[in-house]
Image (cartoon, rainbow, N blue to C red):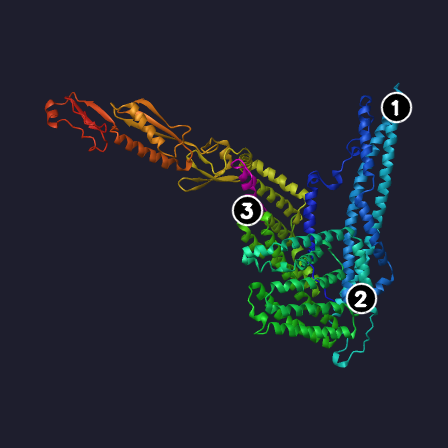
Amino acid sequence: MTPTAFHLPIPSRARAWLCACLGLLAALPAGAQGPAETRTETPAEVTAPAAIPLERIPERIEQARDQSRRAGELARPSTEVETVRQQLAALEEQVAAFGEGGLRATLARFDLRSLESEMEQVTALRRTVLAAQATLSRRAAELTGARDALVATTRAWQLTEAELAGRQLPAEILSSVRGIQATLRESSERLAERLDENLALQGSLAGWLSSIDDRAGQIEAELATARVELFRPEHPPIWRGDSATLGFEASRESWNRDWQALRGYLQARPGHGWVYAGLLVFLLGAFMTLSRKVGQWVQDKPDLERPLAMFRHPLAAALLLAILGLPWIYPDAPIVLRELQGIVIVLPLLLVLPLIVTPSLRGAMYLLAGLYLLLLSNSLLGGGTPLERYTLLALSGAGIAAVAWIFRPGGAGARLEAGPWWRLAQFVARASIFVLVAALLANLGGLVSLAGVLTTGVIGSAFAAMVLFAGVVVTRGAVLALFQTRYAQKLNLVRWHGAAVDHWLMRILPLLALVGWAVNTSRMFRFDGVLGQALSTVLFSSVTIGTVEISLGDVLGFGVAIWLGVLVSRFIRFVLTVDVFPRVTLPRGVAATISMLVNYVVLGIAFVLALAAAGIQLDRFALIVGALSVGIGFGLQNIVNNFVSGLILAFERPVQAGDTVQFSSMFGKVTRIGVRSSTVRTFDGAEVIVPNGNLISNEVTNWTLSDYRRRIEILVGVAYGSNPRQVMELLLNCARSDERVMDNPAPSAIFLGFGDSSLDFSLRAWTERFDDFLTIKSDLTLAVHDALYGAGVEIPFPQRDLHLRSVDPQAVARIGAIQAPPVGDDPGGGPEAPAEPGRTTIPGGGGQP
């Protein structure tokens, strides 16, 4: 048996979801018009051809020439079609071999590895053919639409010529009409020729698909048989001896098939090689450039020494990442290419890993790499030979001994405690001993194929885990090195939140590595098909409720798309807030508006993708929108009104986050403006949710729309007899002495007039510290009081004079005159006022006649 080298495939269902999402985005502009069959409307479909009026003939001649020119450009050889033609030419030999009658009998001689390799080739070939068929179908639709439009235009000119035949017209007009018809017919013929070539290719592809499907069916039947044969002894027990020969004829046939498959695969993708070469050159150059500055970075930050240790071998680290990226550039690669990938990655792995693992684990690392190379070399042996059987016995025994030695109670693996991931690795490693013991017993009993699957699964999955660990560490080291560069240090995201980015990176990368390891392990143990079928049954078994069909996979797809949309929205807004907005000068409130719009645009796109992932068609979504519009007409007017008001607030910005507003009985600061409602925090500490419609339709006082200036007014009354000019000078001095008061506009003191009990003045001053308005007013009021008191200016209390005419004079004499207390004794500070005969003065304006 042969191991399957490490790779990171994208699950087929996830790939289908991704393609559906991208396809939906590409089709959105046209999707609103209806189904694909009715979107392309040619002039012939819109209106029937009719004769052209005489006065419009010159104009329509120019239009027809332009149409003919565009048709000629469309009739030129297409780059996409030529690429498809070259790709199919490279695969023609491989597809033609499927029709050979001897292949059905040949499949019966294939071992499990060869059958899986053949099935992967057929699957990859089918995807290639389907992609080519889609390209040709789009091209055929373009050619057919243009040709039909030319036919309709030519028919209109024929009708025009017939109508003009009996009229006396200049010969130039008839000649132009006939000439444009010839031009249109010539362009139509070129389009027809190109369309015939395209249809011929499509016909060939249809035949290819039939052959490919037949071949896939044959291989699937043989695979089912081979999986059953895994549990049947194909050799006698080892204690009875094995008389099989060491013939390598089957191996030579397998090598030849692998070589042909690899050659055909690479020839069908000539551009991928240049892409991979560019990636390799880029990584090598980047790692070499970074390695020159690592020493200085480590001197400045000693804690970077361990994460950046891999830069001692920058070429090996770059090659390691490049090899890990191979499955993304060459998807659905043959098994032989993945095996070559596993062989090539051993060298850079052994150069990089000793720099990043503890010394006690380096011996285990070299041992595992040696076992994996021995396992790969086993693929050179023919299936069923005794040497292969004994090699598997040796590998199983060596694997048991290695795991037991590493994870013994006092061994390196048992002593090391490196967090939950290492504890998981310890558990899996100890469990693998039981699998290797089962492989050893199966081999002894004659189940060599089963022993090969189990041994390959354990050693291959362990090697894949080691490669993934190295990939995670190298990727993190590369990111940390990039963060130390001069250009990255200019980013606030790196300077202020570099530790947080590293934290999230080390949460995401190990999780992705774990998923990749699980996928590869299931494939190596050959139960990926069973797991895939079980997951497909669980996720995509639908339940029909009325006309609605729901499945768990659709619900999960919808939820995952929305969840990813929320994460992407948060990340984009975080980057805008941290790195973009501080670098640009924007009016107040624009940054919050942009952030809000980005949030809802990303969520809207995520919602559309979620609908596509859930399998909801646009026509069904149109029904939902129609039903929603009816609901809006009846009961959702307020929601729509608030939504539209939120958009008005976002673009017009009459109220912005941070403004202090006053409306109705509410006075507070706007803390958030949403798409439906806004939040106002009152100065009492309450947070009030205000519908956006109230901020648009009602009168709102915005104290801080243009600036944060606020006028302070202090009303002062002094006693009659005071000097008004002295009072005004005192008031102005109080305002000028406070540094929080603005010089422009300058403070002013105004003599308002003569009050009932006082001379009334107003001190008016401006401040830019709106939030401290009340404190500043209080301080100014105290300063005015102290200034007036210090200058001896009296601040009177209200007084009322009551004339008593009907009181007995003797009673008045008994009451006596009420004397006002001297200045300083009376809390009101009123002056001494002698009583007049016949008049009683009562403080506070009270009195009884």
Q: Nearer the viewer, mark 2 or mark 3?
A: 3
Residue 587 sits inside the magenta stretch: yes
Q: Earlier in the sequence, mark 1 or mark 2?
A: 2
Q: Residues within 10 Å of mark 1 (few under 14, many from 20)?
A: some
**Magenta span of residues:** 567-595
Kindly identify the amino acid type of the residue bearing the numbered disc 3. Answer: Asn
- In this picture, residue 723 sits left or right of residue 174: left
Q: Position of residue 16 (x, y in %)?
A: 70, 51
Q: Secondary structure at mark 1?
A: helix
- Name the image quarter holding residue 244: bottom right
- Name the image quarter holding residue 57: top right
Q: Secondary structure at mark 3?
A: helix
User: Can residue 507 be seen by looking at this rendering?
Assistant: no
Real-space CA distance between mark 2 and mark 3, rounded to the nearest whole angstrom: 59 Å
Q: Earlier in the sequence, mark 2 or mark 3?
A: 2
Kindly identify the amino acid type of the residue bearing the numbered disc 2. Answer: Phe
Residue at the disc numbered 1: 174
- In this picture, residue 4 sits left or right of residue 293: right
Residue at the disc numbered 3: 492
Q: Majority secondary structure of the magenta segment?
A: helix
Say how many tags the image has. 3
Residue 216 sits inside the magenta stretch: no
Q: Toward the viewer: 706 or 320?
A: 320
Q: Secondary structure at mark 2?
A: loop
Are the residues at dot 1 and dot 3 in contact (C-beta closer than 8 Å)? no
Residue at 72% x, 72% y is: 451
Answer above or below: position of 156 versus 579. above
Residue at the disc numbered 2: 110
Answer above or below: position of 447 versus 101. below
